[in-house]
């Protein structure tokens, strides 16, 4: 499973790229506005350091989304155009996909919706697990069911688990067979954490320092022996 960052903060993306653990970024105008940047400028900047950058259409009508999607795709070859899972969004996505533009169908909440996304030739479908949990539904069960349906039907559209809230969601997405999980930077950092890793690293370093401290003493002992 590939790991994406769900952010528009360049410094977070840059740090995660440096760690070598992410393969893409999902953005939307809200995230970019929160980061305090112009939409186009920030997407282009992010595309310079990582591939697979989802940029979202904000138009509502099919024809408007087609125009907007073409504009987003023209910004950089790494852009994946996000369209909503609405009739107009899927209609626009179908046109854009037929032109060779990679499409991420967002705001998916059911297997049936995921089948519609696959029908237009979407590159990615994004079920929002956390938002389903918020209304007392099992978001990761829906992710797993979409994966199962796609495999049964030999559908190539990638399943991206979105609205990830915690490290357990990441584990569940991987076990469900999701192709991608996108998460906030805070959740990505938590994936590194385990008390035994921290304790083990501390112990290794302490033992190493002890051996280094002992070396001069051993050297002095050999020197004293040689003088005798």
Image (spheres, rainbow, N blue to C red):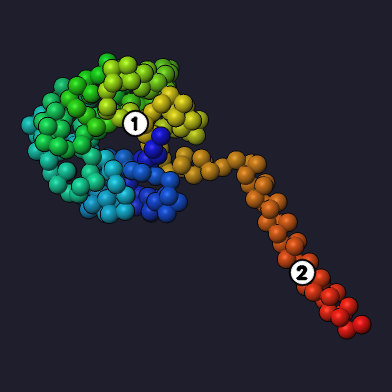
Name of the residue lying farthest toward the bottom:
227
Q: Quadrant of residue 197?
A: top right
Q: Sequence-wise, which precedes: disc 2 or disc 1? A: 1
Q: Residues within 10 Å of mark 1 (few under 14, many from 20)?
A: many
Residue drawn at 88 percent across, 78 percent down: 225
**Front-most of 194 and 65?**
194
The foreground one among 15 and 119 is 119
The relative height of residue 227 versus residue 173 in the rendered view (above or below) is below
Residue drawn at x 16%, y 38% is: 101
**Residue placed most toward the observer, 101 or 113:** 101
Q: Quadrant of the C terminus?
A: bottom right
Q: Nearer the viewer, mark 2 or mark 1?
A: 2
Residue 215 is marked as 2
Tell me the number on the disc at residue 94: none
Q: Which residue is mark 1?
A: 160
Secondary structure of the residue carrying tag 2 is: helix
Question: Would residue 155 appear left or right of 59 to someone viewing this image?
Answer: right
What is the C-alpha distance between the residues marked 2 and 1? 53 Å
- Image spot of residue 172 (x, y percent): 47, 27
């Amino acid at each position: 499973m590939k790991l994406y960052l769900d952010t528009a903060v360049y410094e977070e993306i840059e740090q995660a790229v440096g760690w070598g653990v992410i393969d893409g970024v999902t953005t939307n105008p809200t995230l970019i506005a929160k980061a305090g940047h112009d939409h186009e400028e920030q997407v282009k900047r992010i595309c310079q350091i990582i591939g697979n950058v989802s940029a979202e259409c904000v138009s509502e009508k099919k024809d408007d989304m087609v125009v907007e999607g073409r504009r987003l795709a023209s910004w950089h070859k790494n852009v994946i155009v996000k369209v909503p899972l609405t009739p107009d969004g899927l209609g626009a996505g179908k046109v854009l996909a037929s032109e060779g533009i990679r499409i991420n169908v967002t705001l998916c909440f059911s297997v049936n919706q995921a089948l519609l996304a696959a029908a237009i030739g979407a590159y990615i479908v994004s079920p929002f697990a956390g938002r389903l949990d918020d209304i007392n539904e099992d978001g990761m069960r829906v992710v797993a069911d979409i994966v199962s349906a796609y495999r049964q039907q030999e559908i190539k559209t990638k399943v991206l688990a979105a609205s990830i809230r915690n490290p357990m969601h990441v584990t569940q997405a991987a076990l469900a067979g999701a192709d991608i999980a996108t998460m906030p930077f805070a959740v990505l950092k938590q994936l590194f954490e385990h008390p035994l890793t921290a304790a083990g690293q501390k112990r290794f370093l302490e033992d190493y320092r002890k051996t280094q401290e002992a070396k001069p003493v051993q050297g002095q002992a050999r020197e004293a022996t040689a003088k005798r």
